[in-house]
Image: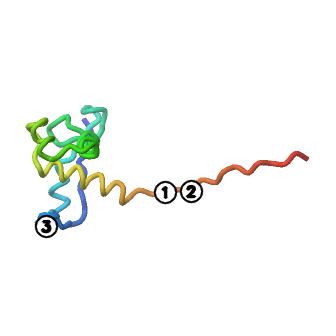
């Protein structure tokens, strides 16, 4: 069975004033092809990073998520946000040339 864990590589400041070690925090994120079709999930659950981000984007609070998904912790929610931020930070944009119309000869 292939299982991947996502490991961050830097320390970050938590808004609450605590320093979070991204490596430790994001050891909570697991990518396993046999769980949720390989989408990143909170380790040991079927709760996807995508679900957490979508719910937060729709206006849900951390408390809403903790109530709806009792196995989640605040650290899991922070890990999902950190994981997504790192994906976006390392995203590459590749310009693609558009074909130029040819004139009839």
For the residues marked 1 and 3, what is the alpha-carbon distance in whole angstroms? Answer: 31 Å
Horizontal and vertical percent for residue 87?
A: 34, 54
On screen, residue 1 above or below 60:
above
On screen, residue 71 above or below 74:
above
Work out whether mark 3 precedes mark 2 in sequence or the reverse, and give the earlier one: 3
> Would you call the spot at circle 2 few (<14 residues within 10 Å), some (14-19), or many (20 or more)?
few
* Left or right: residue 20 compared with residue 100: left
> What secondary structure is marked by label 3?
strand
Label 1, on which residue? 93
> What secondary structure is marked by label 1?
loop
On screen, residue 7 above or below 38:
below
> Would you call the spot at circle 1 few (<14 residues within 10 Å), some (14-19), or many (20 or more)?
few
Q: Quadrant of the N terminus?
A: top left
Residue 53, quarter of the rendered image: top left
Horizontal and vertical percent for residue 44?
A: 14, 38
For the residues marked 2 and 1, what is the alpha-carbon distance in whole angstroms? Answer: 6 Å
Asked which colour scheme the image uses, the reply is rainbow
For the point 66% across and 51% down, which residue is it? 98
> In this orientation, which residue lies closer to the viewer: 100 or 34?
100
The answer to whether marks 3 and 2 mark residues whose Cβ atoms lie closer than 8 Å is no
Horizontal and vertical percent for residue 69?
A: 13, 36
For the point 17% across and 48% down, which residue is it? 77
Label 3, on which residue? 19
Can residue 3 be seen in this snapshot?
A: no
Work out whether mark 1 precedes mark 3 in sequence or the reverse, and give the earlier one: 3
For the residues marked 3 and 2, what is the alpha-carbon distance in whole angstroms? Answer: 37 Å
The answer to whether marks 2 and 1 mark residues whose Cβ atoms lie closer than 8 Å is yes
Label 2, on which residue? 95
> In this orientation, which residue lies closer to the viewer: 85 or 67?
67
Can residue 80 be seen in this snapshot?
A: yes
């Amino acid at each position: 069975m292939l299982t991947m864990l996502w490991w961050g590589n830097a320390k970050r400041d938590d808004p609450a004033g605590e320093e979070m070690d991204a490596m430790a925090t994001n050891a909570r994120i697991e990518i396993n092809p046999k769980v949720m079709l390989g989408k990143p999930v909170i380790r040991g659950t079927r709760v996807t990073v995508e679900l957490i981000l979508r719910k937060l984007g729709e206006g849900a609070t951390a408390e809403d998520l903790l109530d709806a998904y009792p196995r989640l912790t605040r650290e899991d929610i922070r890990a999902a946000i950190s994981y997504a931020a790192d994906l976006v930070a390392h995203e590459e944009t590749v310009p693609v040339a558009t074909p130029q119309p040819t004139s009839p000869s």
